[in-house]
Image (tube, rainbow, N blue to C red):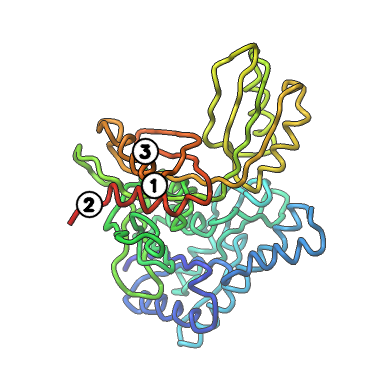
Amino acid sequence: MALIVQKFGGSSVADAERVRNVARIVTDTYKAGNDVVVVVSAQGDTTDDLIEKAQEINPRAPKRELDQLLAAGEQISISLLAMAIEALGYPVISLLGWQAGFNTNSVYGAARIKSIKPNRLQAELARHNIVVVAGFQGINRYDDLTTLGRGGSDTSAVAIAATLHADKCQIFTDVEGVYTADPRKVDGARKLKEITYDEMLELATLGAQVLNNRSVEMAKKYSVEIEVLSSLNPVPGTIVKEVAKLEKMLIRGVTKDTDVALISILNVQDTPGVAFKVFSKLSGKHINVDIILQSFGRSGTKDIVFSVSKENGPLAIELLKGLPALAGAKVLCDTDVAKVSIVGAGMETHPGTASKMFEALYERDINIKMISTSEIKISVIIDAKDADRAVSAVHAAFAPKD
């Protein structure tokens, strides 16, 4: 008998027919003699709808109250799925995040899991129940509901798999696995049979929406093997695990991220400590900074350019315009940009990878604003209008030739 954790995203439970489909997948797994814990997201666009309702009432709603509201989405999903499983004649119980033992910190809207107390989960499994858990949520030390941020249900599933030492963690989505690019937009995109944690983490961080990056970080830390597969088409998916690789370099994926704002601070006084003051101010408000570029000092000034999420762009501008260290500087925000990236182990030891990517963009007359590199990825910031063309061009340059 194996213990299997299965996670189903919002599109997999979007309506009654899909809820029943998920119930069949879960009960088939249970019938095969396995213990099953199911983690479910809110149905379809429920979370977005709830956010819209909050904005109608109070555009600057307190984050604590938003978490109280948004946690309702998963509560609806787990109840409906439990009803569908019960209707098929199987023992089942649904649990909210706090009932399943999720303890988090108090960063409302982006909480981190501190621990899971598995007593209730273990007790229900011992009773041979299928356990349906609300993903994306937990409870903090003040007994307040918290949410984990976008994609948090993936993290919930991996956390349960790690805590219970599950034999398998399956993430069901509306695609059949991890592809070299978005198959709905890029001709020739191929499904990967397997991918390393590091490669998947880069793809997730850089805009691939198959898995949440925090879930991949946790899976790597606790050696949880993940299978990404479709809830709609029963075919083998993609395995995310530690894969032994030879020295051959292979591009695993091309991604785009349009959730980018480019912050430019121009004519900053070229004095020590300015960068520290800028980025510590942003860090104090939990604003994550991605690509950073600083020019050489000239005529007593320099420029600092960096990227943040679109959501954080206006707040970043507001914080920086009042910063004494930037007196006399000009602070601008450009949201009409996108980040396009390639990911693959072995880039560092294979010369010409960057040149090949830049050539593909040049041939499509696509201008590069910023560049960032690491051992396994190269990212460029370009105009948003060029993003889809850029992904197609770069993918074509690196795709294996039949």
Residue 179, position as x, y percentages in the image: 34, 58
Mark 2 lies on residue = 400
**Numbered mark located on residue 358 in the image:** 3
Q: For the residues marked 2 and 1, what is the alpha-carbon distance in whole angstroms? A: 20 Å
Question: Callout 1: 10 Å neighbours few (<14), some, many (20+)?
Answer: few
Q: Residue at 33%, 66% (x, y): give it.
A: 2
Residue 56 appears left or right of 233:
right
Task: Identify the mark nearer the N-term, 2 or 1.
Answer: 1
Determine if residue 85 is in view: no
Q: For the residues marked 3 and 2, what is the alpha-carbon distance in whole angstroms? A: 18 Å
In which quadrant of the rendered view does residue 75 lie? bottom right
Residue 112, position as x, y percentages in the image: 58, 47
Question: Callout 2: 10 Å neighbours few (<14), some, many (20+)?
Answer: few
**Could you tell me which secondary element the residue under label 3 belongs to?**
helix
Mark in the foreground, 1 or 3: 1
Cβ atoms under marks 2 and 1 closer than 8 Å:
no
Q: Amino acid at mark 2?
A: Pro
Question: Callout 3: 10 Å neighbours few (<14), some, many (20+)?
Answer: some
Q: Amino acid at mark 3?
A: Phe
Q: Quadrant of the N terminus?
A: bottom left
Determine if residue 47 is in view: yes
Mark in the foreground, 3 or 2: 3
Q: Residue at 68%, 50% (x, y): give it.
A: 108
In which quadrant of the rendered view does residue 3 lie? bottom left
**Could you tell me which secondary element the residue under label 2 belongs to?**
loop
Mark in the foreground, 2 or 1: 1
Q: Residue at 75%, 31% (x, y): give it.
A: 321
Q: Quadrant of the C terminus?
A: bottom left
Q: Amino acid at mark 1?
A: Arg
Residue 108 appears left or right of 83:
right
